[in-house]
Image (cartoon, coloured by chain):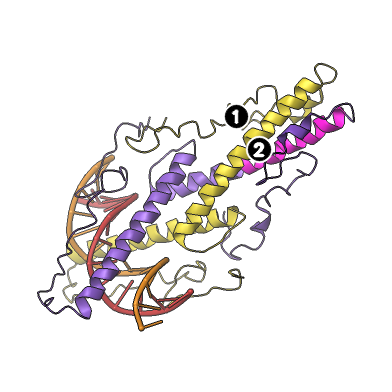
Chain colours: A yellow, B purple, C red, D orange
Amino acid sequence: MENISDEYTHCWETNTFFQAEDLQGYLDEEIPTHDSSSQDGTQSSLMANRNIVSERNRRKKLNERLYALRSIVPNITKMHKESIVEDAIDYIQKLQEEERKIQAEISDLESAETSSKSTISEFDHDETFSSSPKRLTNESFYDSRGSRSSPIEVLEVD
Amino acid sequence: MENISDEYTHCWETNTFFQAEDLQGYLDEEIPTHDSSSQDGTQSSLMANRNIVSERNRRKKLNERLYALRSIVPNITKMHKESIVEDAIDYIQKLQEEERKIQAEISDLESAETSSKSTISEFDHDETFSSSPKRLTNESFYDSRGSRSSPIEVLEVD
DNA sequence: ATTAACACGTGAAAC
DNA sequence: TGTTTCACGTGTTAA
């Protein structure tokens, strides 16, 4: 059911949602300007075209990011922009919970072997996460969703 | 530098990007219809208003999902829609890599204690992930980005 | 003053 | 059929 990965080439005129690659030369169009007063073109029409092109680029870039997000998330159900972000949220939450649980297992296994061996020293060659299980307590490795209490509102990022 | 967490309350008229909370009653407007031929209103204007309202709802819903995604991701740098998805992608990738590494540690610790104890049986009460470290090999728990080979075909995430 | 980001309305296409 | 999703162009606003 719902074999979405077949082709899904919809696209009415130029591009649309799901190819994002064949639209290589659609962007340098002339833009009809729909107004025949673009002879001198010092103020209105030129600026308007700049805005149009900028908007096209912005839209395209955001869409590409959305495709990338979709390609990252494993269990994609639907292709709607809304569902893509939705599934990504769900996946992140599951991943965070999984990660927390696994760390609990790690500390448990660590306490199991008390001080007999030290096979953990070979995983310290990564700097982005400092993944030595000694310091990898519950939420120190990445600040896992620790700022969920006041997310939007005033938007204090840090 | 770049203290974006100050306020960032922009919003020209009704809402805009970053409050998403005070816009409770802006949606039930009358919609001017911009055409004074809406007396009978059987075909054109009524359908047009339906479309307008649907579009507003769609836009609002997608934005809410975007806010939710932002609230999940811990290290938010910028507030643009584009950057939100971008940071989410980066975060997911790091999370996946972290998770894989931690599982490697787990199997290593497991092989360390060979067959002395079995403290892992108390984490089996979850069904969504089946988080028993015996079966939690590299990419069995969630199909971690295993479908990146043919997601959109062209669309290389870069 | 130029740029960048956004919401909006609208027509068209997909479902 | 009708509903839903989309890209587009436009005006507006903040940096």
Toward the viewer: A64 or A24? A64
Q: Are marks 1 and 2 on the same chain?
A: no
Please, is residue A113 above or below residue A129 in the view? Answer: above
Q: Is residue A54 visible?
A: no
Image position of A49 (left or right of A27): left
* Chain of the residue displaying label 2: B
Image position of A47 (left or right of A106): left
Magenta segment: does it hold B104? yes
Q: Position of residue A75 (x, y in %)?
A: 61, 56
Majority secondary structure of magenta residues: helix
| Residue A47 occupies quadrant | bottom left
Report helix, strand or loop for mark 1.
loop
* Chain of the residue displaying label 1: A
Label 2 crowding class (10 Å Cα cut-off): few <14, some 14-19, many 20+? some
Toward the viewer: B5 or B115? B115
| C-beta proximity under 8 Å, tags 1 and 2 | yes
Residue sitting at x 71%, y 44%: B130
Image position of A14 (left or right of A42): right
Q: Which label belongs to residue A141?
A: 1
Q: Which residue is mark 2?
A: B98
Please, what is the three-letter code of the amino acid marked with disc 2? Glu
Residue sitting at x 72%, y 29%: A106
Please, what is the three-letter code of the amino acid marked with disc 1? Phe
Q: Position of residue A87 (x, y in %)?
A: 53, 53
Give the magenta range.
B95-113
